[in-house]
């Protein structure tokens, strides 16, 4: 696994390109289909407040104005960082276990939705929707709007990582040697 220079370059470039593009895709999908009702704190915002509050950093520490619109800078940075981290996981996993690329990466997006939004985020107490009377945000407690926003957003996001990986693999030309050919 990743024994040669080309494999390592694919991992690096796949992570960088996939992380960058997928972060824009995920952010853009939430503009079209907001997952939360107005006024609710997002799970990334809740994480930042809980984990970095003691340092004086909160979910609004990096907010900025762009054309009169307030942009949540810390939450945006958080989404960007997780996109790079999961792009790295996706590209590395695809070298070890090519089945992770099932349905052009859509299966990976579904798994991430279930693991993160269906289990980890509510388990840690970072999602208690107001429309669910404060009950934990397990998948069965989410309204249809939020559920579809998260499912589709993660599918778009993971497929965009796969498309970037395909582009990176194509860049390195044919024939491709190493773990990427299985």
Image: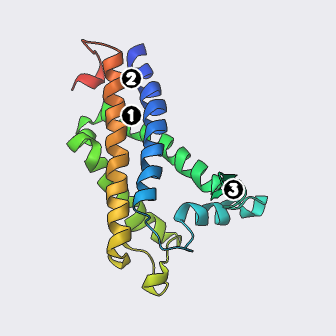
Nearer-N-terminus badge (1/2): 2
Going 64% across and 60% down the picture, which residue do you hit?
A: 48
- Which part of the image, by quadrant, shows the C terminus? top left
In this rendering, which labeled residue sits more in front, label 1 or label 3? 3
Q: Secondary structure at mark 3?
A: loop
Q: Is residue 110 left or right of residue 89?
A: left
Find disc 2 in the rendering and name its residue.
Answer: 2
**C-beta proximity under 8 Å, tags 3 and 2:** no
Q: Secondary structure at mark 1?
A: helix
Residue 74: image tag: none
Residue at mark 1 to residue at mark 2: CA–CA distance: 9 Å
Query: Looking at the image, can residue 114 be seen?
Result: no
Q: Secondary structure at mark 2?
A: loop
Query: Looking at the image, can residue 12 be seen?
Result: yes
Which x, y percent locates residue 161?
37, 38
Find disc 3 in the rendering and name its residue.
Answer: 63
Going 38% across and 20% down the picture, which residue do you hit?
A: 7
Find disc 1 in the rendering and name its residue.
Answer: 92
In this rendering, which labeled residue sits more in front, label 3 or label 2? 3
């Amino acid at each position: 696994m990743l024994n040669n220079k080309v494999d390592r370059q694919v991992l690096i470039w796949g992570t960088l390109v996939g992380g960058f593009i997928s972060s824009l895709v995920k952010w853009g999908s939430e503009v079209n289909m907001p997952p939360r009702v107005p006024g609710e704190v997002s799970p990334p915002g809740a994480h930042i407040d809980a984990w970095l509050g003691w340092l004086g950093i909160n979910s609004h520490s990096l907010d900025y104005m762009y054309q009169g619109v307030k942009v949540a800078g810390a939450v945006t940075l958080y989404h960007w960082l997780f996109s790079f981290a999961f792009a790295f996981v996706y590209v590395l996993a695809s070298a070890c276990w090519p089945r992770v690329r099932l349905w052009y990466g859509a299966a990976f997006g579904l798994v991430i939705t279930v693991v993160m939004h269906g289990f980890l985020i509510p388990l840690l107490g970072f999602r208690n929707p107001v429309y669910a009377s404060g009950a934990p945000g397990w998948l069965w407690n989410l309204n249809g709007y939020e559920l579809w926003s998260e499912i589709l957003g993660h599918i778009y996001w993971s497929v965009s990582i796969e498309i970037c990986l395909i582009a990176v693999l194509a860049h390195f030309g044919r024939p491709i040697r190493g773990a990427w050919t299985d």
